[in-house]
Amino acid sequence: MKINKPKLLIFDVNETLLDLSPLKTTINNAFQNDYVFDSWFSLLLQYSLVETTTEHFQDFGTIGKAAIQMLAEKHHVPLTHDEITDILGWIRKLPPHKDVIEGLQMLQESGFRLVALTNGTLEVAKEQLQYSGLEQFFEQVFSVESVRHYKPHGLTYMNVLRQMDIPASEAMMVACHAWDVTGAQRVGLQGCYISRPGMVWYPLERKPIITADTVIGVAEKIKKLFKV
């Protein structure tokens, strides 16, 4: 089967590009528990999907605060509204993974158009990319809030394609979350999976055409596959 060279690379932001370690440390320290961050992130995704499947919408930050409140109640940890706000404020001050800048430079210099697509708000995403020094690489930043559905709902990807005027077959979703790449592939985009530490592929979905450990690895494989 012939694979079209992608004209557009769509990047997930949190975990794919940005290292969540500072936020993880802050949350775990607040609860004095090394595993609460993982529970929080799972709840954040779970209730974002609840909002989507029930045709409601709360922004990602609001759901994130609710998830912290749920865990505080579960673990009997008293946290004020201001304390929760301060904890989650670290989402705006995340460094890029060490491989990201070089990998994005390689892709940009090879002529690929790059955009970002996040479940977070547009305001937070732009602040994140500015803080991390990554904004220079992206032609545009998209948030799911414009369609009021969270990834991996198909509308989130199709909205980007519509605004960029690119057919699904000529776009590639790049993410370290199997559910994100799966959602994109199921509406016709090409998939690229970054297997960050601790991440595993969803075995009920076909494997993406590109799998790599880093953004540098992604750039190398894309350049080799499409001879650029």
Image (cartoon, rainbow, N blue to C red):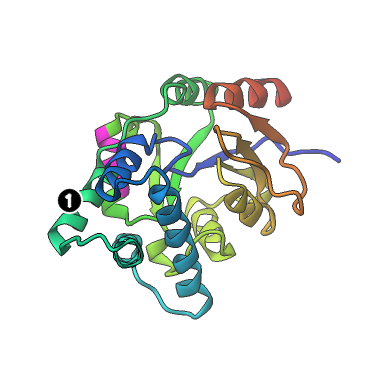
Residue 39, percent from left and from top: 44, 55
- Name the residue: 59% across, 40% down: 199
130 in magenta = yes
Q: Quadrant of residue 144?
A: bottom left
* Image side of residue 213 versus residue 13, left or right: right
Q: For the image shown, how many numbered marks are present on the structure? A: 1
Q: Residue 148 occupies which quadrant of the picture?
A: bottom left
The residue beneath circle 1 is 86
**Left or right: 86 in relation to 16:** left
Q: Residue at x 45, y 40 (%)?
A: 15
Residue toward you, 40 or 131: 40
Q: Nearer the viewer, residue 109 or 22?
A: 22
* Percent of width and height locating residue 117: 45, 49
Query: 43 or 222, which lies in front?
Result: 43
Rendered residue at 25%/38% (across/down) = 93
55 to the left or right of 204: left
Magenta range: 125-131
Res 28 quadrant in image: top left
Callout 1, which amino acid?
A: Asp
